[in-house]
């Protein structure tokens, strides 16, 4: 049986608050250090708040009100979700890494705004470095001295990072069309709008680089003229309606995304004005993007001369942690680019991005599947290894440090493979950006607000992520110990599920609907003798009622916490749905009834806590969880179904 990794003991406050002294020492030390910084800024200045102030009635009254409200808040927060506990197996959240938590607390009193170096001269640099750290993890070029170096920045979460990916892909597509309309002299352009709008990302980047070089050779006045000429033709200036009216031979593009894609994708299409009808849903096979279905979508688009903006692959779906065949999507991009249908590939790795630490050596090279597999029983499959190995060939990636990075909310991240593309997103604000963008990479992105959706950005979050990555570098020997421990936990969980299914076979049918690709596992359950999907769903609903937060019930009365999700039969496909229903002894023919539920409610478990297997105290919380399930199932089945 897998045991806890002792190298992780200093990483967290701990389920029992075991490292409270360490955290307290750090917080007090750096709070005092902040105070000393204030006092030494200009020591000749007299204190603005007199020492006698603390004895005044107004001061004491204010302190009393503040203490009252803080005590009230503290009491209310005791009803929060206990995500720190090994008894919590629910959503994608767990305890926080001490380096990130402490760095955020340390930075908060300085209150840096990472929109520009003028508001955050220290933490804006840290955010740029975080982007390079994540680029290296993915396999993107990460040397700022190279012209094609990647660029990444933090966002409030994966949703905004996905929106940024669409913004950039759309700007890249429309740029070549606008450049044709501006028609600079003695400049080689795509032959028509269709070709321009369907350049492959690499070709569009090369065109952009040639344009910027051409501009640099002009006199300042002429350069301003041609920049203005291009700006008048850009989609970002004209808007969707006017842009596509001016260019009737092209249509608004589609986004090809799997049925499992996060709800942020339709949200993003609405926000960008493309509309959800431009989302081409790609069917799945066994809960993974079906490459044949993707090919069908792309072939149909090419035949109709329908542009495609982006193909999305998911590295760790929200419901099941499934990893799509990123390598196959990249191959499809290259194949269709050769046929004249260019589009970007974006990987939504909000959940699974940090799993890549297991695949990286300390020098940044990729580990072989054999090397990674030596630490586990089943992980990784050849399919998963190929998907993660292909990340470096994609065009952009979303990663959420506040998920498997164990960083406080909200810390998402967007990483673009080639930073030169970001110039198409640049906006100006004289009161913030007083100088033109510098040609030097690191100096340019010290004005990061030019390129990101937000107008204000918390520098404390950049500090939290940066310090965490410095304390635990993003390779298998350091940060990789965390996901390694959770994957050992998921393998233990799946093995225990099989034993649980055998132990409870006289009461309930149990199965794992899909073998986990990452550290999420679902359980499908159906009472013995039941043939109705609706009744099975009702049973799981009643079982989950004892696994969720109830504001009217003290937390301590809950033994474990979990979540649910629904497994849609159309997502599984006919063959996958048939296998699942047969495993649960449900009637497959029931799916043909229009009134029958077309989805199955399942228990969903996120195995993030590294202390589920507590060798120090001989406690196995996974065993305890299945013992709990066994007891509750027997109680539920003792009454009417």
Image (spheres, grey):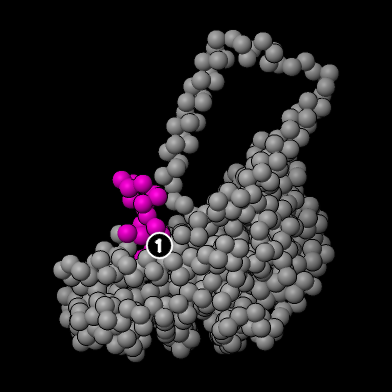
Residue located at (79% from left, 52% from top): 443
Quick one: 272 or 616, which is closer to the camera? 616
Question: Is residue 495 left or right of 424 when viewed as pictured?
Answer: left
Residue 517 visible? The answer is yes
Quick one: 297 or 170, which is closer to the camera? 297
Question: Is residue 540 left or right of 347 when viewed as pictured?
Answer: left
On screen, residue 139 above or below 101: below
On screen, residue 259 above or below 447: below
Quick one: 218 or 300, which is closer to the camera? 300
For disc 1, the marked residue is: 562
Residue 306 visible? The answer is no
On screen, residue 411 above or below 32: below
Residue 188 locus on image (x, y percent): 70, 75
Residue located at (50% from left, 60% from top): 86
Q: For the N terminus, give its image quadrant.
A: bottom right
314 falls in the magenta region: no
Residue located at (28% from left, 78% from top): 508
Question: Is residue 127 left or right of 454 when viewed as pictured?
Answer: right
Q: Which residues are magenta?
A: 546-566
SS majority, magenta:
loop
Residue 562 locus on image (x, y percent): 40, 62
């Amino acid at each position: 049986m897998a045991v806890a990794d002792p190298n992780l003991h200093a990483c967290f406050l701990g389920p029992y608050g075991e490292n409270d002294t360490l955290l307290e020492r750090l917080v007090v030390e750096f709070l005092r250090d902040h105070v000393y910084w204030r006092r030494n800024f200009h020591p000749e200045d007299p204190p603005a708040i007199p020492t006698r102030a603390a004895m005044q009635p107004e001061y004491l009254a204010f302190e009393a009100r503040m203490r009252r409200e803080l005590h009230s808040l503290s009491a209310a927060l005791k009803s929060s979700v206990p995500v720190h506990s090994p008894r919590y197996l629910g959503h994608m959240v767990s305890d926080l890494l001490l380096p990130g938590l402490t760095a955020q607390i340390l930075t908060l009193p300085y209150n840096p705004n990472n929109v520009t170096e003028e508001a955050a001269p220290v933490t804006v640099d840290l955010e740029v470095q975080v982007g390079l750290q994540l680029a290296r993890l993915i396999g993107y070029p990460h040397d700022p001295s190279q012209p094609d170096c990647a660029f990444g920045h933090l966002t409030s979460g994966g949703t905004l990072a996905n929106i940024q990916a669409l913004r950039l892909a759309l700007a890249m597509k429309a740029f070549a069309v606008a450049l044709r309309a501006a028609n600079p002299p003695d400049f080689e352009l795509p032959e028509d709008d269709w070709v321009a709008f369907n350049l492959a990302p690499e070709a569009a980047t090369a065109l952009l680089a040639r344009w910027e070089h051409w501009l640099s050779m002009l006199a300042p006045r002429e350069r301003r003229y041609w920049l203005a000429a291009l700006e008048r033709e850009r989609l970002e200036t004209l808007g969707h309606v006017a842009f596509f009216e001016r260019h009737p031979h092209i249509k608004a593009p589609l986004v090809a995304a799997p049925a499992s894609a996060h709800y942020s994708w339709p949200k993003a299409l609405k926000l960008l004005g493309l509309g959800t009808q431009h989302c081409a849903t790609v069917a799945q096979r066994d809960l993974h993007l079906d490459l044949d279905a993707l090919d069908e979508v792309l072939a149909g688009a090419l035949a109709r001369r329908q542009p495609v903006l982006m193909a999305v692959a998911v590295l760790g779906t929200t419901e099941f942690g499934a990893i799509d065949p990123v390598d196959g999507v990249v191959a499809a991009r290259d194949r269709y680019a050769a046929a004249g249908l260019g589009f970007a590939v974006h990987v939504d790795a909000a959940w699974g991005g940090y799993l890549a630490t297991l695949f990286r050596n300390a020098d940044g090279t990729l580990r072989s599947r054999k090397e990674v597999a030596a630490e586990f029983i089943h992980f990784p499959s050849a399919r998963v290894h190929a998907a993660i190995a292909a990340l470096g060939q994609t065009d952009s990636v979303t990663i959420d440090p506040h998920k498997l990075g164990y960083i406080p909310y909200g810390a998402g991240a967007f990483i673009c493979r080639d930073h030169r593309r970001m110039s198409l997103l640049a906006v100006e604000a004289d009161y913030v950006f007083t100088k033109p963008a510098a040609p030097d990479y690191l100096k340019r992105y010290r004005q990061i607000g030019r390129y990101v959706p937000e107008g204000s950005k918390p520098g404390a979050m950049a500090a939290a992520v940066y310090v965490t990555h410095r304390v635990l570098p993003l390779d298998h020997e350091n940060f990789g110990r965390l996901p390694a421990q959770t994957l050992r936990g998921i393998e233990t969980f799946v093995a225990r599920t099989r034993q649980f299914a055998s132990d409870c076979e006289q009461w309930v049918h149990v199965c794992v609907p899909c073998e986990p690709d990452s550290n999420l596992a679902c359980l499908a359950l159906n009472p013995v003798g039941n043939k109705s999907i609706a009744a099975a769903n009702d049973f799981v609903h009643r079982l989950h009622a004892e696994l969720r937060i109830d504001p009217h019930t003290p937390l301590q009365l809950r033994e474990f916490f979990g979540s649910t999700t629904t497994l849609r039969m159309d997502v599984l496909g006919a063959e996958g749905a048939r296998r699942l229903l047969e495993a649960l002894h449900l009637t497959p023919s029931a799916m043909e009834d229009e009134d029958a539920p077309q989805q199955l409610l399942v228990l969903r478990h996120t195995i993030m806590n590294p202390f589920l297997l507590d060798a120090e105290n001989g406690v196995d919380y996974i065993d305890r969880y299945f013992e709990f399930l066994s007891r509750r199932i027997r109680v539920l089945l003792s009454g009417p179904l």
